[in-house]
Amino acid sequence: MSYSDCLSDLLCGEDSSDIFSGESPGCSTDLESHDFEEESSIASFIEDERSFVPGFDYLSRFQSQSLDASAREESVAWILKVQAYCGFQPLTAYLSVNYLDRFLYSRRLPTDGWPWQLLSVACLSLAAKMEEPLVPSLLDLQVEGARYIFEPRTIRRMELLVLSVLDWRLRSITPFSFTGFFACKLDPTGDYIGFLISRATEIILSNIKEASFLKYRPSSIAAAAILCAASDIPNLSLFNPEHAESWCDGLSKDKIIGCYRLMQDLVLDNSQRKPTKVLLPQLRVTIRARTRSSGSDSSSSSSSSSYKRRKLNNCLWAVDDKGSSK
């Protein structure tokens, strides 16, 4: 066999004229197919998102004070502090609050403070296990001003209760399921997509404590957040919010505009407030939980005797020496 015969076996059977003609019949078709599949996926998220949010009357329970709005706000604030302290992803914090709201819609909690804290820790732990590559111990999660310290076995029992109430459906649809797609719709050139997603994420987390947003579904919250983020970019600030409905089938113009206006008011209000410094704890939670005051130093150190452990109804928490157990 000659050398030229060997080379001929390695050559493609395609016509060189097809290669250099500048035509790629499959390329545009593939791109169009990918865009269609992506839009279909987003449309299915919009259709299914109602299964991963509390019922429509959940907000009215806070308005009628059958549920404690201030207790929810305090729990969400604590979750956000721990998310920042541990360096968790924004999705972890949002999932934690989502689990908490879905649980509260189905189960009533006592008005005392410790059940809310226990639920917050359990929801945050479950969300961290879903999204984070490294998850702190259950004791190390109880930082950033946690008023009650629970044993790991108590938290694990609460986790099982949350899983049961949520029917083990932890892979929730959140606003972060939509932000990337909506950013591309608003900015087809792709010049500002990174900023839009980052700023929208910041806006979503900063407003998650507000019970007023509970009447809006994740897709509307995502669209409103992208629109608010676009207002910071001169080239995109003139976009009409009413046109956001065309981004995907199933979106509601009225819901998007209502959420957008509420978000704008809160963003403006937050920007006018002076930032406050958050003091990090000086002691690890495992040290604080196990602190005991001895007879020799009880008179000289108030911090060493500020917490003691008490067990009741198989739940473990810390109360101060004055006997307050809110």
Image (spheres, rainbow, N blue to C red):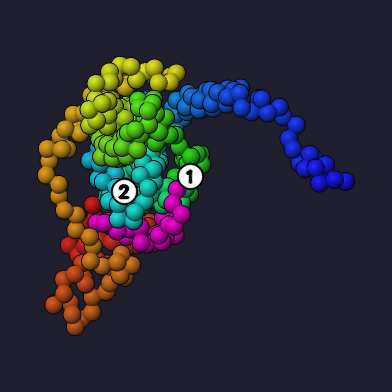
The magenta stretch is 131-158
Seen from the viewer's position, the closer of residues 279 and 224 is 224
**What main secondary structure does the magenta stretch of the protein show?**
loop
Question: Is 23 within the magenta?
Answer: no
- Which label lies toward us, 2 or 1? 2
Residue 228, placed above or below residue 160: above
**Side (left or right) of 171 relative to 69:** right
Residue 163 is tagged as: 1
Q: Secondary structure at mark 2?
A: helix
Instruction: State the image coordinates of residue 2 (x, y, percent, origin top left).
Output: 85, 45
Instruction: State the image coordinates of residue 66 (x, y, percent, origin top left).
Output: 28, 33
Q: Which residue is mark 2?
A: 79
Q: Amino acid at mark 2?
A: Ile
**What is the residue that sits farthest to the right in this orientation?**
1
Q: Secondary structure at mark 1?
A: helix
Q: Residue at x 43, y 57 (%)?
A: 135
Residue 180 figure quarter: top left
Residue 319 figure quarter: bottom left
Residue 53 seen in the figure = no
Mark closest to the chain's N terminus, 2 or 1: 2
Is the residue marked by circle 1 packed among few (<14), some (14-19), or many (20+) residues within 10 Å? some
Is the residue marked by circle 2 packed among few (<14), some (14-19), or many (20+) residues within 10 Å? many
Number of dots carrying numbers = 2
Q: Residue at x 80, y 42 (%)?
A: 4
**What is the residue that sits farthest to the bottom in this orientation?**
296
Residue 28 seen in the figure = yes
Instruction: State the image coordinates of residue 274 (x, y, percent, origin top left).
Output: 11, 44
Residue 181, placed above or below residue 142: above
Q: Amino acid at mark 1?
A: Leu
